[in-house]
Image (cartoon, rainbow, N blue to C red):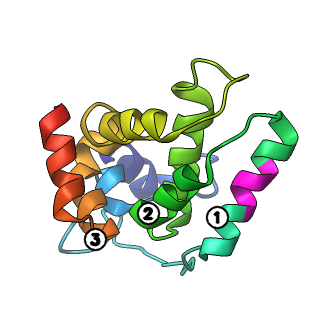
């Protein structure tokens, strides 16, 4: 972040016209009581996705890829993220790309549980935001306990 701050302060010497950091503040590592580290800030309100929009996103993936996803997995993605677009997309990427060992097989709850645990404890963004992710998602005691038991 300090490198971007230096560029901002010496902006006449650079051809950079803009910079956008998009995501959950805690996950980006820019969570600050004073606001933006650049002292310039414009918040863009991006509403959470509805359950139907999350279902539609995963239906589009299934239609495009041919890989089935159990409806319970999509429900869990929505429940855990509460439809936050960045988190929905991140979990979608983890489920369908990074931790998708067999694209010809259905993505089920067992795979979801593994991906969720890895997201909260192993993934760089998740390791920083794991607590915030669980808090933002309003995780039930059983969810947090399951993650602790695995890890």
Answer whether residue 104 is magenta in the image.
no
Looking at the image, residue 27 lies above or below residue 126: below
Please report the bounds of the magenta region as a residue range: 56-60
Which numbered disc covers residue 54?
1
Which numbered disc covers residue 147?
none
Picture coordinates of residue 150 (x, y %)? 19, 33
Q: Which residue does the image show at 60% across and 58% down from the upper left?
A: 18
Answer whether residue 59 is magenta in the image.
yes
Counting every numbered tag in the picture gives: 3
Picture coordinates of residue 90 (x, y %)? 52, 47
Mark 2 — residue?
81
Residue 56's image quarter? bottom right
Looking at the image, residue 13 lies above or below residue 107: below
- Badges 2 and 1: C-beta atoms under 8 Å apart? yes
Mark 1 or mark 3, earlier in chain: 1
Q: Separation of disc 2 and disc 1 at Cα?
A: 10 Å
The answer to whether residue 30 is seen in the rendering is: no
- Looking at the rendered structure, the secondary structure element under dot 3 is loop
Between 106 and 46, the one lying in front of the other is 106
Between 28 and 73, the one lying in front of the other is 73
Q: Which residue does the image show at 60% across and 35% down from the upper left?
A: 107
Q: Separation of disc 1 and disc 3 at Cα?
A: 18 Å
Which numbered disc covers residue 138?
3
- Looking at the rendered structure, the secondary structure element under dot 2 is helix
- Badges 2 and 3: C-beta atoms under 8 Å apart? no
Picture coordinates of residue 11 (x, y %)? 51, 54
Q: Main secondary structure of the magenta part?
A: helix
Question: Is 14 displayed left or right of 24 in the figure?
Answer: right
Q: Quadrant of the C terminus?
A: top left
């Amino acid at each position: 972040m300090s490198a971007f701050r230096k560029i901002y302060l010496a902006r006449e010497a650079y051809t950079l016209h803009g910079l956008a950091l998009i995501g959950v503040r805690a996950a980006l590592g820019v969570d600050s009581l004073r606001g933006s580290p650049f002292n310039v800030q414009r918040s863009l309100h991006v509403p959470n996705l509805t359950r139907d929009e999350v279902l539609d996103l995963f239906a589009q993936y299934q239609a495009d890829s041919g890989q089935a996803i159990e409806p319970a997995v999509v429900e869990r993605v929505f429940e855990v993220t509460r439809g936050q677009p960045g988190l929905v997309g991140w979990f979608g990427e983890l489920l369908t790309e990074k931790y998708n060992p067999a694209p010809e097989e259905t993505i089920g709850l067992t795979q979801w549980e593994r991906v969720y645990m890895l997201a909260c404890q192993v993934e760089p963004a998740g390791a920083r935001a794991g607590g915030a992710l669980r808090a933002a998602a309003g995780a039930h005691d059983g969810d947090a306990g399951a993650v602790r038991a695995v890890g």
